[in-house]
């Protein structure tokens, strides 16, 4: 567990539900989410279960931070040793409930997508690092500095630890934002059978 000296606050259990609602709004049109949940109504109903699982996984095995008690934004970070979601880790984070709510067809699509993403992760980051699993900001609070408030303290800590950071994004407009924080594009390509343009980025400590 990373100690950022109170510069931002760790997501609490009481904040999980509002964080899920915020992420559902923030990622409603994200290419990954629209691929997993192509139908709009199903996306609004089912994607919250995925966000809750990912938040709880991050809280169990990494670090999840939010901007304030109002949860304008959330960042989920994982040390590389816990980046792989094993059956036991998934179970501890609510994986059974996720499967029951989403159903086999959607879970299979999610696992297939995750397998593709993991291949690039293993290819480009076969060394100890932290992974920014995702960063989401409520649409009402975007362009107000929330992303910087969430990302800078962890990057400062990673610089102090001499630890690289890895991320991927399927949203092309985010690439320049991450470049602003020192990430470099190491590969871009359209993922097979998805039509999704995938960007892999790395940041080395300063």
Image: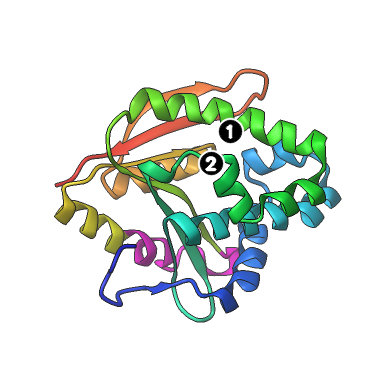
Residue 43 in percent (x, y) is at 78, 49
Give 141 or 170, whichever is nearer the viewer: 170
Q: Which residue is denoted by mark 1 in the rendering?
A: 114
Residue depicted at 42% across the width and 45% down the height? 82
At mark 2, the secondary structure is loop
Question: How many tags in the picture?
Answer: 2
Up-down relation of residue 154 to residue 189 (above or below): below
Quadrant of residue 150 in the image?
bottom left
Give 172 or 95, whichever is nearer the viewer: 95
- Queried whether the magenta region covers residue 112, the answer comes back as no
> Distance of mark 1 from mark 2, alpha carbons?
10 Å
Q: Which residue is denoted by mark 2 in the rendering?
A: 85
First to last magenta residue range: 138-151
Up-down relation of residue 68 to residue 193 (above or below): below
Given contact means CB atoms under 8 Å apart, are the residues at marks 1 and 2 in contact? Answer: yes
How many residues crowd mark 1 within 10 Å: few (<14), some (14–19), many (20+)?
Answer: few
Of mark 1 and mark 2, the one earlier in the sequence is 2
Judge from the rendering whether residue 136 lies leftward or rightward of residue 157; answer left or right. right
Residue 112 in percent (x, y) is at 65, 28
Quadrant of residue 110 in the image?
top right
At mark 1, the secondary structure is helix
Residue 189 in percent (x, y) is at 49, 21
Residue depicted at 72% across the width and 32% down the height? 109
Residue depicted at 30% across the width and 77% down the height? 6
Quadrant of residue 4 in the image?
bottom left
Judge from the rendering whether residue 157 lies leftward or rightward of residue 110; answer left or right. left
Our reading of the magenta stretch's main secondary structure is helix
């Amino acid at each position: 567990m990373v100690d950022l000296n109170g510069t931002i606050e760790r997501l609490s259990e009481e904040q999980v539900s509002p964080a899920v609602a915020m992420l559902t709004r923030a990622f409603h049109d994200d290419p990954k989410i629209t691929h997993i949940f192509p139908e709009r109504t199903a996306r609004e109903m089912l994607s919250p279960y995925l966000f809750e699982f990912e938040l709880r996984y991050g809280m169990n095995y990494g670090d999840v931070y939010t901007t304030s008690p109002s949860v304008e934004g959330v960042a989920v970070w994982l040390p590389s040793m816990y980046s792989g979601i094993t059956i036991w880790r998934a179970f501890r984070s609510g994986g059974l409930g996720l499967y029951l709510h989403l159903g086999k067809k959607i879970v299979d699509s999610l696992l297939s997508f995750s397998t593709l993403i993991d291949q690039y992760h293993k290819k480009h980051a076969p060394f100890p690092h932290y992974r920014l699993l995702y960063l989401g900001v409520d649409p009402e609070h975007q362009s107000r500095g929330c992303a910087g408030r969430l990302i800078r303290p962890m990057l400062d800590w990673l610089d102090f630890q001499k630890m690289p950071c890895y991320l991927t994004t399927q949203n092309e407009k985010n690439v320049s934002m991450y470049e602003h924080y020192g990430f470099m594009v190491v590969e871009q390509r359209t993922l097979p059978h998805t039509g999704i343009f995938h960007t892999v980025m790395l940041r080395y400590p300063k």
